[in-house]
Image: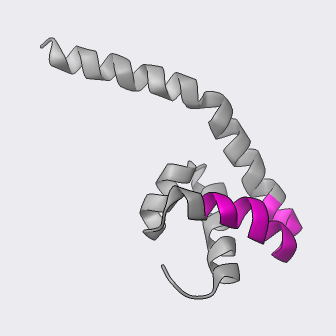
Amino acid sequence: MKGNMEERAEQLAQYIIENRATVRAAAGKFGISKSTVHKDITERLPRINPALAALARQVLDVNKQERHIRGGIATKEKYLHEHR
């Protein structure tokens, strides 16, 4: 998704908030890198729309706290499928 970076940052934040999405999920949905998503949310968006940035940051912080759990679940699923 090329074009206006400010508009993209706001769209990313809306997507993350509405879907409780991870950085990886948002990057995949918008066809951009995880680094770009992170930069948009942490650097660009606070200058454009601080309130929206704060909401998106809350979702990303929760995702960060839960990522070890999701990783463990993914590993468990992997080994369950390999041993069938």
> Up-down: is 38 above or below 65?
below
Where does residue 1 sit, x and y in percent of width and height? 48, 79
Outermost residue, bottom direction? 3
Where does residue 7 sit, x and y in percent of width and height? 66, 82
* Quadrant that contains the C terminus: top left
Outermost residue, left direction? 84
- State the residue at coordinates (49%, 62%): 33
Quick one: 60 or 37, which is closer to the camera?
A: 37
Picture quadrant where residue 38 is located:
bottom right
> Up-down: is 41 above or below 3?
above
53 relative position to 16: left or right: right
Q: Is residue 21 magenta?
A: no
The secondary structure making up most of the magenta span is helix
Where does residue 25 sit, x and y in percent of width and height? 48, 53
Picture quadrant where residue 61 is located:
top right
Outermost residue, top direction? 83
80 relative position to 1: left or right: left
25 relative position to 54: left or right: left
Where does residue 53 sit, x and y in percent of width and height? 79, 62
- State the residue at coordinates (43%, 60%): 28
- State the residue at coordinates (58%, 65%): 36
- State the residue at coordinates (36%, 21%): 75
In this picture, which residue range is highlighted in magenta? Answer: 37-53
> Up-down: is 72 above or below 63?
above
